[in-house]
Amino acid sequence: MKQLLVAVIAAAVLAPAGARAQEASPVGLWKNIDDETGKPKALIRITETNGELKGKIEKLFPAAGEEQNPKCDQCEGARKDQPIIGMTILWSMKQDGGEYNGGQILDPANGKIYKSKMSMADSSRKLNVRGYIGMPMLGRTQTWLREE
């Protein structure tokens, strides 16, 4: 009986800590917001494999009159003319203290690949994603909103 009580108390104490740790991770579904228009652009699912994060586009929010299932006609190599929906646009991101660094991000609108870093904000409900060339100060940041 005493062991059962200890197990129940331990589970009650550790469960919230586990939930907080999971919540603090960028793993999940995110809506990216265009930093120029303020409108949603896509839903991106971030997953983790062996400590590396990657993000894949699950859904686009095209404006009226825009292609509903566009292809990455500006991309090079294997991504050239491939559908943007289902495309991995973020890869090799690793946790570095309170941030995620060392990754790359693809902008399907222009086919360019940038260095990238990310940081969580607003109690893990927002993800600040920065793409840059050379130094982080030479880039731009989008805020992604957690969907789940």
Image (cartoon, rainbow, N blue to C red):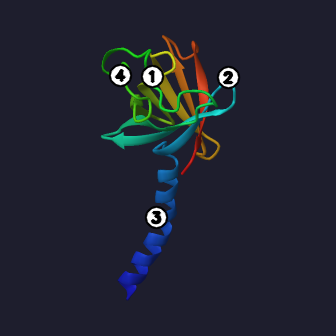
Task: Write down the residue under mark 1.
Answer: 106
Which label sits on residue 14?
A: 3
32 left or right of 115 in image: right
Of label 4 and label 1, which has the lower sequence position? 4
| Corner quadrant of residue 33 | top right
Disc 3 element: helix
Please report contact status of discs 4 and 1: CB closer than 8 Å, yes or no. Answer: yes
**Pointer 2 or 1: first along the chain:** 2
**Marks 2 and 1, how far apart at CA:** 17 Å
Three-letter amino acid code at disc 3? Leu
Mark 3 closeness class: few <14, some 14–19, many ≥20 residues within 10 Å: few
Kindly identify which residue carries mark 4.
79
Q: Nearer the viewer, mark 4 or mark 1?
A: 4
Distance from the alpha carbon under mark 3 to that under mark 2: 42 Å
Relative to the observer, which residue lies in front, 58 or 129? 58
Disc 2 designates what residue? 36
Q: Earlier in the sequence, mark 2 or mark 4?
A: 2
Name the residue nearer the viewer: 52 or 112.
112
Q: Disc 1 or disc 3, which is closer to the eye?
A: 1
